[in-house]
Amino acid sequence: MTRKRLTVLLVAAGSLAVLAAGLWLRSASHAAPEPPAPKIPVILNETLTNELSDTADLRGLDAAVARYLRNNHIHGASLAIMRRDSLVYAKGYGEADKGVPVAPNTLFRLASVSKLITATGIMVLVDRGSLSIDDKVFGPDGILKEFNDCYRDKKYERITVEHLLRHEGGFSSRVPDPMFSTRTLMQQHGWALPPTPDVLLKAVLRQNLTYVPGTTPQYSNLGYLILTLVIEKVTGRPYEEWMQENVLHPAGCHEFHLARNFYEGKYPTETRYYLPSNEIAVPCYDNSGQLVERCYGGNDIHGLLGAGAWVASIPELLRFVATIDGRSEVPDIISFDRVADMTEWFDDQTYSLGWNDTKETGEWTRTGSFSGTSALIKYYPDGECWIMVLNTSTYRGNRQSSQTGLLFHDLRRDYSRFLPHRDFFFE
């Protein structure tokens, strides 16, 4: 082989090598990118502080909230804001207890916001095939058929799980609410101790229903107590224990508890609850004759169970909402079909499942109120969700949440564009 031919071959081989390398580099540049590292959720009550949400652009928001508390004589509040499943703001305002400021990890009673949590527990069971919302609650094939001997009114046998979720069980809201009449019921029935849920339900079932189930919306705390018993019957577990293990912990919520009735029993990071200055002492719910503050013994708050007894921090409550909203950024704990069931709109008179109201526009609302507590969740069509819970009753009672809603409207108008791009839900 001549030197010239050898040179040509070497050059050709070199060119092929360069071409092959170029093709490899081109192929590598178009290869699928490495998947992003999975986001690691944090324990919110261990990581959040008020200082993390101190932002110069939002000082006006802070001032507006402080003014709202001052004008309404509210001791303390917790506010958390989510944008498209990212926790962007979490802050406490005012006083949780004497000398103790409200912080993001401060626990608050959630009142009827608890119904949203209970409804989600039902949806988890529906997804698992353990029940259907069309299932009858009483009657020969009812979930709670052990109560069938307690009633004579056969309308009870028409009640379905969905009727209870939508406040259409046939109970009247015009008579004293048995969930807030413990002392009176003890006197009427000669009970020495406050009734257990079973005892209370047996007493109520002796009365005829006011309406045919499924025909007349009438807000009912009793209906959600019955749903609590449905969850216990279907799962064979105590309500609080099963909900924590199967609903709340999977949602990333680690410090939800059922409320305790007296100040001495409150959880270590729980706020104190306050009443208007003109409130007078009332007889204790347990018929002991002791006079108490209405928010500490006036009613059996623990006995509300799934109708109104949950206690939580507001950032964890927002995390819970992120897992039932149908968005993909935070994995949901229920299927998209169940989210659709819970948020389906029918008309202005029909309650949504767990939510107070879900509008055609995509705005969802959940409120909660009783002595010492006012709570509001607003989920907006643009993906923002605002939650505020107050630790003080006002003269407006359950109408205070409407004032909080007006506050949200103004704050969103003035400060939504300044909300930071971050996510406190994850590391």
Image (tube, grey):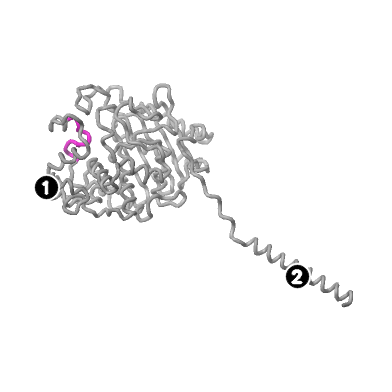
Q: Quadrant of the N terminus?
A: bottom right
Q: Taking 328 as reference, is 257 above or below it?
A: above
* Element assignment for label 1: loop
Q: Position of residue 57 (x, y in %)?
A: 52, 36
Instruction: Answer left or right for 4 relative to 90.
Output: right
Question: Between 109 and 193, which is closer to the camera in this rendering?
Answer: 193
Q: Which span is picked out in magenta?
A: 173-183
Which residue corresponds to mark 1?
Answer: 153
Q: Position of residue 240 (x, y in %)?
A: 32, 40
Which mark, by number, is residue 43? none
Q: Amino acid at mark 2?
A: Leu
What residue is at 67 percent from the left and 64 percent from the top? 26
Which mark, by number, is residue 16? 2
Q: Which quadrant holds residue 77?
A: top left
Q: Taking 159 as reference, is 50 above or below it?
A: above
How many numbered circles are shown? Answer: 2
Cα–Cα gap, marks 2 and 1:
91 Å
Q: Residue furthest left?
A: 152
Q: Amino acid at mark 1?
A: Asp
